[in-house]
Image: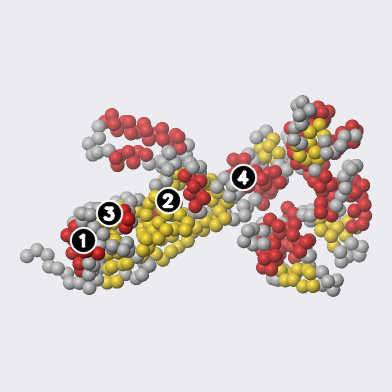
Amino acid sequence: MAGNRTLSQVQTIAELAKLDESDLAPTCQCLYFGSELNAADMVLMEVENSTLDFLEKGKSIVIRGEKTDSAVLCLDNKTYDIKDTDTSNTLLILPQCSTPDECVESKRQIVNRQVTGLAKSYYEVKLMRPKLRKLRSLLEDCPYSGDVYEEEAGGKRYTLDHILDVVQASETEIRDELKKLRACHISGFWRMLHFDYECQLLSHILSLIEENSWNFRKIPLGETLDTLENLEPRAILEHTFECFGERLPRQETEDDEVFYCLDEDKVCQMFAEMLLRPAEKFNLAEFLLSWQQSVPEGMTTGMHQLQGVAIIDKNSKPEVIFHFPFCLMPENEVDRFNFLFKTRDRWTQEEMLPYIEDLVTEKLSAGALLQKHARASVGTNGVRVYNSKRPIK
Amino acid sequence: MVQLVVKSASPDSSIPEWMLIEMQGQLECPGDEQLAGNFIGDLHFNKKGVPIMIIGHHILFGKVTSLDKPYIVLLKNTKPTPKEAEHLNKSVSMETDQDEDVVTKATTDEEEDGSSEGIHYKVSAAIKRKIVFRTRPKPIITYVPKKGH
């Protein structure tokens, strides 16, 4: 049946349609549905040009998610939300079809073209924030507390492949998040360290620094590992340096010795958490004093180190501080603001920023976010504060 | 579902460009006949480059446009298809030894794929332009010419 159309049939119908033959390009393309047309097997997906370039370089893209998730599309470092879009139009897919500039043949002729796909919908993709909250909850199932506790440690352990199976984010985004979680690669599995164990590791290192009167900005890695290896595995100690410090660039004069500089802010933040975690609320003045006394010599505590870790209640007398870690935040924007306003009625922009910063995108600034979810007012003390726009659930 | 890896269908990862024709409403065959294998219509271009489509007794005028964002055409497979592709290229009279060749090739391809079971998608083409017919089709006023004598 396909391809039985003749030039004269084409000409007859064109005439009936009152088309002037001299005004038509000589080639007419006769369209047929392919004999193996199966709409369900062919899917259209609208992508960014960069995604197409990526594929043309031979790289793969991945559609990810569990049965209950809505699917996402991942490149190596980006995540897109996939949405099925219906159209009232019919979309015909043709592997070959000429456009006017290609119909240059001077002889009047017909060319048969196959329509191999028929679509009434297509997939649209939109760049999104990766859903990484799940990663923390997965890894919290079985935190690492040192080799001695490994046998009795229950819970599930995850390799990177497992993680990629269930967390809806690109590989780069997942690796960045693992770093933020201070997760460590132990015998093939990605593990978060138990908070108490992290404290223990850090205190081993800090005691050694004190014993040797080293400068915390220049700690010899080799010597530290050699001294402490009876207490903790070398790899874990080195991981601790990676989490709380920075490897110094190698200098010409020192052969192979590697040095680390501890990050003052990160170490002080850790000490603040050690104090705040067990307490529900802490008298602010007392806290600030004990905090400064607890940190290693030479380090100075500062309020900026408490961002995303704790908040201060200035309305109570005396002023109090309490542990309010960023990791408690719901992932979803609306839930996030609801949670924040449930914790406290009024926030200054400065107080709120550490808890909403990750929601800020190129298109949505922090100001716009606040405008969307909060109402501003100026308090009696002249400070601008924000309260919820919606009733709090 | 866990992870569906999607990559170019061709080994050298080139992605051919295909064309999309978009029109209002939907195409139906008289009665309950399947669309597959049936004739749709004639696509002309006039000297100004305007696409003109005649479907049944309807005429449509459209235009060729470039897409802001390209489409990729994903082909859903439950099994790899190199065998089918080979068959299509071969002539009708296929010799036995050739046939064996085909089977061996298909199995190696399957192994290379690593996932011969379950759904997987391949990018078979990209669409960067489309011919779109936005206006409603106009009827062609005609009489049915008597055939034969």
Residue at numbered disc 2? B126
Mark 3, Cα crowd under 10 Å, few <14 / some 14-19 / many 20+, is few
Tell which of A351 and A229 is nearer to you: A351
Residue type, numbered disc 2: Ala
Would you say the residues marked 4 and 3 are in contact, meaning their CB atoms lie under 8 Å apart?
no
- Which quadrant of the view contains residue A185? top right
Q: Can the viewer see residue B38?
A: no
Residue at numbered disc 3? A104
Residue at numbered disc 1? A10
The lab-note entry on whether marks 2 and 1 share a chain reads no
Looking at the rendered image, the disc whose residue lies closer to the viewer, 4 or 3, is: 3
Chain to which the residue tagged by mark 2 belongs: B
Residue at mark 2 to residue at mark 4: CA–CA distance: 26 Å
Looking at the rendered image, the disc whose residue lies closer to the viewer, 3 or 2, is: 3
Residue type, numbered disc 4: Thr
Residue in the image at 37% along x and 35% along y: B106
Q: Can the viewer see residue B49?
A: yes
Residue in the image at 77% along x and 54% along y: A308
Residue at numbered disc 4? A172
Residue type, numbered disc 1: Val
Looking at the rendered image, the disc whose residue lies closer to the viewer, 2 or 4, is: 2
Q: Is residue A383 left or right of residue B83?
A: right
Chain to which the residue tagged by mark 1 belongs: A
The outermost residue toward the left is B149
